[in-house]
Image: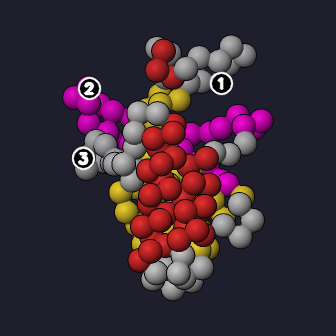
């Protein structure tokens, strides 16, 4: 991110036999993104060299809005922030975790810093992207 100014969505799978990572195509809709994660899970499962999954992490760029009483879509919020997001899931109990780093750009648009960001305490890291990966992995694992 610091070198190129962007980060292509990437999934990392840590298994009992091996760790792998691969880019994930991200469509414009949530359904398209879930489909991309499902296909990534199928691909990793069919390769057959990871073993039992111990951790799956999705890293991608996103926009977030500051926490407010009135929700604003980041795409419509002038106060939005660009972030690098790390979403993880433990396949043994489906517990999800979430970390984000705010992208600080200089006047030329170059990313010069990634500052740790925080989630509101009431926010729970839940989502269908990592679950889609796990479902496919379990369905197609040899």
Marks 2 and 3, the one that precedes in the sequence: 3
State the CA–CA distance, disc 3 to disc 1. Answer: 29 Å
Q: Is residue 110 magenta?
A: yes
Closer to the chain start, of discs 1 and 2, is 1
Residue 67's disc number: 1
Q: Which residue is mark 2?
A: 107
Where disc 3 sits, the SS reads: loop
- Depth check, front residue: 111 or 65: 65
Q: Position of residue 25 (x, y in %)?
A: 36, 48
Give whichever of discs 3 and 1 has the lower sequence position: 3
Residue 137 among magenta residues: no
Q: Is residue 102 visible?
A: no
| Residue mark closest to the camera, 2 vs 3 | 3
Is residue 106 rendered to the left or right of residue 65?
Answer: left
Q: Which mark is residue 99?
A: none
**Residue 72's image quarter?**
top right
The local crowd at label 1, few if under 14, some if 14 to 19, many if 20 or more residues have their Cα within 10 Å, is few
Main SS of the magenta part reads strand
Query: Which residue position holds label 3?
Result: 4
Tell me the magenta residue range. 96-123
């Amino acid at each position: 991110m610091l070198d190129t100014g962007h980060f292509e969505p990437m999934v990392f799978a840590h298994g009992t036999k091996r760790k792998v990572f691969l880019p994930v195509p991200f469509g414009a809709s949530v359904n398209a993104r879930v489909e991309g994660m499902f296909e990534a899970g199928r691909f990793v499962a069919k390769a057959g060299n990871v073993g039992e999954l111990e951790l799956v992490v999705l890293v991608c760029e996103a926009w977030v809005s500051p926490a407010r009483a009135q929700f604003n879509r980041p795409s419509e919020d002038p106060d939005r922030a660009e972030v690098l997001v790390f979403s993880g899931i433990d396949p043994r109990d489906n517990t999800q975790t979430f970390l984000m780093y705010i992208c600080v750009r200089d006047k030329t648009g170059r990313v010069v810093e990634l500052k740790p960001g925080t989630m509101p305490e009431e926010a729970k890291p839940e989502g269908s992207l990592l679950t889609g990966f796990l479902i496919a992995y379990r369905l197609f694992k040899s």
